[in-house]
Image (cartoon, rainbow, N blue to C red):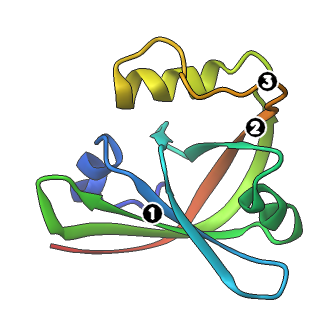
Amino acid sequence: MSVIPQKELGILQSKGFAHVATIGPNHEPQSNPVWFDWDGNYVKISQTKTRQKYHNIQRDPHIALSITDLTNPYHYLEIRGKVERIEEDPDKKFIDSLAKKYLGQDKYPYNQPGDERVILYIKPERTTSQG
């Protein structure tokens, strides 16, 4: 059973950005907005292996994210949980699917030579919401 309240599923199906927070190497929080997908069990985000967030998750899988309703900025969903698994994305199919969702483009236009992408599967453990 999901910990996501039924009334908040609309936010998870939106094109809102997820502001994702992890814990850095010196125990400082690190947060930035990212594209995301919800598959009914996991919030999924794409990362390259060179990014700080990927290194933070390797050390500590705890993660928090918040998504604001695009139609009402006072309505949000916060999710706390853990990265339960990491999958390689060598063909970049997942980031391409996010480019389709957010940009309407079939291919992610910002790939760089040598980018190694992974998919982080975040299992929600607790949520809060307002609005």
Q: Quadrant of residue 95?
A: top right
Q: Residue furthest left?
A: 71
Q: Residue at x 64, y 69 (%)?
A: 63
Q: Residue at x 84, y 79 (%)?
A: 25
Say which of marks 2 and 3 sits in front.
Answer: 3
Q: How far across and down, in percent of the image, does residue 12 sit?
A: 35, 48
Q: Amino acid at mark 3?
A: Pro
Q: How far apart are labels 1 and 2 at the CA level?
A: 25 Å
Q: How far across and down, in percent of the image, does residue 42 sit?
A: 56, 46
Q: Amino acid at mark 1?
A: Val
Q: Earlier in the sequence, mark 2 or mark 3?
A: 3
Q: Which residue is mark 3?
A: 113
Contact check, label 3 and label 1, Cβ < 8 Å: no
Horizontal placement of 54 versus 95: left or right?
A: right
Q: Nearer the viewer, residue 83 or 56?
A: 56
10 Å crowding of disc 2: few (<14), some (14-19), many (20+): many
Look at the picture and state if 130 lies above or below 67.
below
Q: How far across and down, in percent of the image, does residue 61 sit?
A: 77, 66
Q: Which residue is mark 2?
A: 118
Look at the picture and state if 108 lies above or below 42.
above
10 Å crowding of disc 1: few (<14), some (14-19), many (20+): few
Q: How far apart are labels 3 and 1 at the CA level?
A: 39 Å
Q: Residue at x 83, y 87 (%)?
A: 26
Q: How far across and down, in percent of the image, does residue 75 sit?
A: 19, 68
Q: Which residue is mark 1?
A: 3
Q: Nearer the viewer, residue 126 or 95?
A: 95
Say which of marks 3 and 1 sits in front.
Answer: 3
